[in-house]
Each structure stands twice: as structure tokens, then as C-alpha cells.
Image: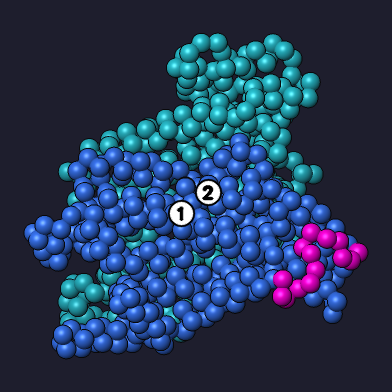
Chain colours: A cyan, B blue
Amino acid sequence: MAFLIRRLAFYVVAIFVAITFNFIMPRLMPGDPVDALFAAAGGRMPIETLEAYKEMLGFTDGPLWVQYLQYLKSMVTMDLGPAIMLFPVPVTEVLGNTLPWTVGLAGLATLASVSLGCFIGLYASYNRGGFVDRFVPFFWQFVASMPQAVTALFVFFIFALTLKWFPLGFGANPDLDPGFNWPYIKSILHHAVLPMVTLLVSMLATWIFTMRNAMVNVLGEDYITMAKAKGLESRRIMTHYAARNAILPVVTAVSMALGFAVAGQVFIETVYNYPGVGQLIIKSVGARDYPLMQACFLLIVLCVLIANFIADMLYVWLDPRLRG
Amino acid sequence: MKTLKRYAAGLIRFYRGNPAGIIGSSIVALILVACLAAPVLTDKDPNKRVARGHQPPSAELVFGSTRAGKDIYTQVLYGGRVSLMVAFSAAAVTTVIALAVGVSSGYFGGRIDETLMAVTNVMLVFPQLPLLIILAAFLGQVGPLVIAMILGLTSWPWGARVMRSQTLALRKKEFITAAEVMGESRWRIIVVEIIPNLISLVAGMFVGTSLYAIGAQAGLEFLGLGDPTVVSWGTMLYWAQSSAAFLVGAWWDFVVPGTVIALVGGGLALINISIDQVSNPKLRTGRYLKIWRRMKAETEAKRREA
């Protein structure tokens, strides 16, 4: 319990650092950022809203610490005002619309890459020095070393543009009625295939290596030798003795990877025009909507921290030594 | 001189019977040399219009032309100079910071360790890419030098942790204690005794960060956060995307820079894997077991001679 509380305190500090970073950045910029925002809104924003906006962001008269407290208050109460880019839709609503797409995609891709990667890693360590062990991890490492932007472009070019197997973008067919019905869900899945494959390609190598290396470590343990000496079947030793223990580092790494998948989807969502947080952050940069951009950043940080905390809890659950 | 010779010998031993290392290094070296020799390999100007827009690859234009009619072959060569320069300088900055933070944290311990690790851990939980995007967005369309600095100053935390744990392990070794007892200064111990023993980690980190920086730079520029007037592999992708090269069927416009980036990335990854495999005996498979055994036998033979 003490461990979890310590971790929690650490994450709270991290959030404060992120908020403080968001507070400082616009103040280091030359010129008045709020006036720049007003210009970016292109006359769609009434002057009263501008005043409220200034107050929310802490651009009030008064010393810096008062401004900071003001800013903290609006962050903690989630009073983020309207998105300038999509005036007058509130920022929280814009974020709420994009988050499920990103988290869903990251979740599915992580799940798929972990299962496939662990399987390949297990197979490789089972046949140590065999074909799969010697070449497959190398091959995937080579493929995964392509920057995500490049992988996304190539996959898009081959499967969406040339072969026309998959749609050219968006999260689902816009002509369909959104809701819990089969045609819509099918459309979502169909649109998610290519972004998922891209994420899968860039994540798979990690899992193959994590699983294989964990297995190699575990296979050197005495209790494996003992099991062999007892004359147990090698397949049984692999699955029941070794894999069970080797999976521990993988399980804890999974939730962290989930957080980073959310953070890493920027390129993929941009290339596939996928309606997630990653695309939103780029769009808001293009529209010079700095508060929206910073809200996206904070949301991504929050996702990563939550994923980290889940990893910590899993760790405690799996490793009895931490449960003092 | 003697240490230089020893490193050279170590390098030769590393490459012998190590195909992944040789292939990876050759790819990277070949592309690097080609970029450096750009004025010899092409007589065109990367910024000048030399043909009609979106001409397919031909004998005249080996890799075709961009929408603006610039020669892609020339752009790839000159762009590589910028991209590789950014990658290697970002990697150098990162490695130096990671080494400084990790070693001082591990060797001095106490309050220095606590403070440095607190900063490192907080930096580590921040997702890198969104952080880069925010920084680049606030700084306005950033040039290559600024990108290199941003990448260099934000990617060190993981390396610092690795260096720290290795330093902690080294610190308990007898030769460090011996040096301390002999009254050598702390800085001398760090520079002469500890850092040379971290050299494989340093090499691995430099290669790994270069790999990351190549991708991150290309990505940032592809997203339009870089300075689009500079010719680099990332801005080539950006122009290909913004001139809708895809939709008009001008595949060469992004396939060429994309492939070069992928090749450099793959080459660096191969070097990194082979460093890993040689310096971490547990992970070895097949052929690498042999290299390791031979290196071990040679060192032991030398020790016996001495």
C-alpha cells in the first residue's frame, strides 16, 4: 500500500509539472498570446468571451503567482472554455469526442501486438537458435525501426490507395447512423484495420524481444532444471513453468505501452485522418489554438499517467513481495 | 594512443563474424558518405526547378521530380546532410547529458542522486512526442538546429537511468575501491575508471538515440512543425504530403525519402541489436554465442599472459 501511495504522489507531482509547463510556455512567447488567439478566432469570438477567456487562462492583472493560482483553478475544475478552432464548442466536449477513438485504437493494437509478440517470443525461446529465433526478431526490429510516419504512409499507399482494400480515412463511414448497430460497428472496425496494422508493426518487435528475453532469463533458473530432471515433457515445462513467470514483466509493460500508444498515435491519426486526440493536437497547432493544443497535451499526459498507475497496481498484484 | 589502439582492436573484434553489425554499419556509412559527397554525385541544385512537376523516375531524373519540379535524387542527397546532422548531434547531446546525470547520480549518491533521479523520473513519464509537438509549436516553424536541440535536451532520461544503474554496479567493484584507497580524486575515478567501462552503453545509446532522432525529426517536419524551406528528408515528406503526391499517383515523391529514412533506421537498429547481443551474453542466439565465447577466451588468454 505504501508503494502505491508513493507512486500516486509521484503522479500528482508529474501532473503539476505538466500544468506548470503549460502555464509557462505561452508567457515565454513574444507578444500577447490572447490577442493572437483572438486574431486566430477570426471575429467569431465576442469580446465578452475574450475577457472570460483571459481570466480562465490566468492572463489577469496581478503578480505571477495569482495568475498561476487562477490557472490551476480552471485546470482542476476542468473549466477549459470554448475551443477557438471550433468556436463555440467547449474544449471538454471536443476532447471527449476524440478520446474514445484514440484509446480504442491504442487498446486494440496493444492487445493484438502483445498476444502475437508473446506467442512469437515464446516460440523463439522454445526453439532457441532455430530459424524463428535467429531471424524473425531481427526482421521485426528492422521493420519497427522505420519511423511511424513512414510506416503509416507506406501502409496507406499500398493497402488503401493502390489495392483499395480499406477506406482512405475517417473513423467510420459518415453516411451511417452512429450508434450501437452492426453496420456502424462493422464500419468502425473496417476503418480501424490500417491504423491498427501500422501500430502493430511498430510495437510487435518490442513484445517479441521482451517475451523472448524474459523466457531466456527464466529458463536459466534452478526450478526449470529441476523440472527437467523430474522428466517432465518440455512443452509442459515451457507453458506451465517458464511462460507463467516470464509473462510478469510483459504484463506490467503492457499498460505502460498502452499509454505510449495513445501518445504515439499522432502520425497514424494524421495520415489516416482518424478522429482522435493525436489528429486534434496537430489540427490545433495548425489553427494556432494554443489552449486546445495544451488541453490535448494534458489529456495525453493524463492517459499515460493513468496507464502507469494501472501498471503499478498490476505489479503489486502479481508480485507478492511488494505487498508489505 | 594505447587506449585508442585498444578501442580499435575491440572494434575489429566486435565486427568479426557479426553480420548484423557489418550490414547495419555499411548501410549507414554508405548513405552518410553519399550525402557528404553530394556535390560530386550530382550537379543540380536541390532548391532549383530543373524539370516539370511530378515527372516519374527516368534516366534523366533517377528518382523523378517533386511537384515544384525539383530533382528528388539531389534533394535526398542534400537533405540527408541536414537529417543526419540533426540525428547525430541530437544523439551526442543526449548521450553527454545522460552520461553526466547517470554517472554523477550513481557515483555520488545521497542528495545528488535523489534530486537528479526525481527530475529524471518526472521527465520519463512525459510522453515525448506530444512534448516535442508543443515545444515546436510554441517556437514556431523550427529549423534543423532547434530540432536537434529539442530532441537532445528531452531524450536523455532513459539513458541516464541505465547509466546510473551500471555506475552503481561498477562502484562496488574492487578496482574502484582500490583507486579510492589510493587517494585518487573523484573526478579522476569517474573519468579514468568508470566512464571507460561504460563505453558499450555509451555506443549503444548514441546509436539508439540517433535512430530515434531520425524518426522524430522526420515526423515533426512531416507534420509541418519544421521549417519547410530547409531541404531535409522530413520536409521532403511534408511537401509530398501537402502537394497531394499520393492522390495524383506521384508515389516516388514520398517513397524515395521514406525508403532512405527506413534504410538508415534499419541500419542503425541492426547496429544497436548487435551491440546489445555482444555486450549482454544472456540474450545471445546462435552465431552471437560464438563471438562472445571467442571474445571471452581472448581476454582470458591475455590476462593469463600478463
Q: Can residue A60 be seen in the rendering of this structure? A: yes
Q: Are marks 2 and 1 on the same chain?
A: yes
Looking at the rendering, which quadrant does residue B71 occupy?
bottom right
N-terminal of the two: label 2 or label 1? Answer: 1
* Residue B229 appears left or right of B112: right
**Alpha carbons under labels 2 and 1: distance apart:** 8 Å
Question: Please, what is the dominant secondary structure of the magenta stretch?
Answer: loop
Residue linked to disc 2: B149
Q: Which residue is mark 1?
A: B93
Is residue B62 toward the left or the right of residue B15 in the image?
A: right
Counting every numbered tag in the picture gives 2
Q: Quadrant of residue A37?
A: top right
Q: Amino acid at mark 2?
A: Met
Which residue is more in the foreground, A37 or A282?
A: A37
Where is residue B128 drawn, in percent x and y? 50, 47
Residue in the foreground of this view, choosing between A21 and B196: B196
